[in-house]
DNA sequence: CGATAATTTGATCAATATCAAATATCGTGG
DNA sequence: CCACGATATTTGATATTGATCAAATTATCG
């Protein structure tokens, strides 16, 4: 688990970091409810959305396993959107009250939170930037380069291509075709590390 | 200017928040240089990118007027990318050293920074989410809904459509066509507030 | 070993990008 | 206040490319 979560949760009273399970289709919280917690997804998937006057839903974020969400709850008295479990979901709830009161005095904790958020900002900006690239080949290639070990020019995958294609904003079919094309062109080579099941991609120069 | 910047800069010694002008094509900072400042763009545009072993550039972010960038410099000793002025640019430099030393003890300042970053995270997530919508019409409509005043179901523009189309990840031609189509379908109506030059979009139900 | 998910390739379609060009609007200097 | 250049808006024609639907193969997990 991420460092900041460790630092935040350690020394936090039991009541302030409870687990909660939500069945698929149920709400974790609703718009305008008092913002009592922020969350870490342990398992499942949560969709956050606003609802307009005429009932139209506007999705703001989909939080997946390992991700935190509703950090903004710390700075608001009420939630500004709905959070719906798209699957059977388990989350850890971190009490905003508890956190906030510690943040009032504990500057180190605030730094830890800022660090976490600053990294999120960096990653998200990079993701937006990546999606500005229209060509599937170029987008995939840039993703590989972003992830690559700078010296070895190599990326080791931690997920299926099917999952990665979502992050890329492309269909899996398109991704597989791009992979084939890039390998064809000699820009990458795909290597299956026989020990682990993890595929790794070697970037070739030019 | 954003609140947090006010709070951060007020009471900050003159030396810790200097203006700096950079000519188009010059670097604001380079990869591996000591991370001495984070920045606010006053005017111009700055591109941040990494450079791979073979010289390939990977863009991570393009910061525009009014935006802050390199917040992560606070948590690193060295910059992890290059920052190049794409236009003649003026920035405000906020000393990381000064900021960091204040953040060590000033919990309120840390909260202000966290608040700023949490909002950025929220906005960026919403932007990524929006770009997952493939249809231009749907994407534009959802953008309008995100921006809309919840009661009046109305969005007042603060920029040209040409600028907005970039945020949407669409070409301006596509955006204009979508606008026409959505108005045709009666889903929106475009209204020119004669007083100001600002266009406003009224969302219709269904 | 069976079931489920992931990978891979093919054919076709639809939608957006692109290129082009005309009009409208804005801002600025005279 | 007006003229003029720059920018924004708007519509048209066409091409490209990624999405979609299909299906076969392979890998993974219990």
Image (tube, coloured by chain):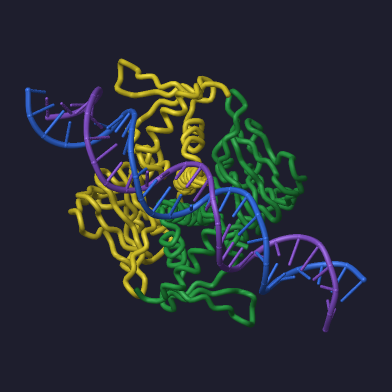
Chain colours: A yellow, B green, C blue, D purple
Residue A102 visible to the viewer: no
Residue in front for this viewpoint, B103 or A206:
A206
Q: Residue at x 50, y 72 (%)?
A: B155
Q: Which residue is nearer to you in this view: A61 or D25?
A: D25
Give the vertical position of B10 relative to A194 (above or below). Answer: below
User: Residue at the location (40% across, 23% down)?
Assistant: A200
Judge left or right: residue A205 versus residue A78: right
- Residue sticking out furthest to the top: A194
Q: Residue at x 22, y 51 (%)?
A: A20
Q: Quadrant of the N terminus of chain A?
A: top left
Q: How many marks?
A: 0
Q: Is residue B67 visible?
A: yes
Residue B49: which quarter of the image? top right
Q: Is residue A33 above or below residue B75?
A: below
Q: Say which of A150 and A73 sits in front.
A: A150
Q: Residue at x 58, y 74 (%)?
A: B199
Q: Where in the figure is residue B116, as x and y percent of width and height?
A: 52, 56
Where does residue A28 sit, x and y in percent of width and height?
Answer: 26, 58
Q: Position of residue D20 (x, y in %)?
A: 32, 48
Please determine whether, in this image, residue C14 is positioned above or below residue B95.
Answer: below
Q: For this rendering, which residue is in front, B202 or B179? A: B179
* Whether residue A147 is situated above or below residue B38 in the rendered picture: above
């Amino acid at each position: 688990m991420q460092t900041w979560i460790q630092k935040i949760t350690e020394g936090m009273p039991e009541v302030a970091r409870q687990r909660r399970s939500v069945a698929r289709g149920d709400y974790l919280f609703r718009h305008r409810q008092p913002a009592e917690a922020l969350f870490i997804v342990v398992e499942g998937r949560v969709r956050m959305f606003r609802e307009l006057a005429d009932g139209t839903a506007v999705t703001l974020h989909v939080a997946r396993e390992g991700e935190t969400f509703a950090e903004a709850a710390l700075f608001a008295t009420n939630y500004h959107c709905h959070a719906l479990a798209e699957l059977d979901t388990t989350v850890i709830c971190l009490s905003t009250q508890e956190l906030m009161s510690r943040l009032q005095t504990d500057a180190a904790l605030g730094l830890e939170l800022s660090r976490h958020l600053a990294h999120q900002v960096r990653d998200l900006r990079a993701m937006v930037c990546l999606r500005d690239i229209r060509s599937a080949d170029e987008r995939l290639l840039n993703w590989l380069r972003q992830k690559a070990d700078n010296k070895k020019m190599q990326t080791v995958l931690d997920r299926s291509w099917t999952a990665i294609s979502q992050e890329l904003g492309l269909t899996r079919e398109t991704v597989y075709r791009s992979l084939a094309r890039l390998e064809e062109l000699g820009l990458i080579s795909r290597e299956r590390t026989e020990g682990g099941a993890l595929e790794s991609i070697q970037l070739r120069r030019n």
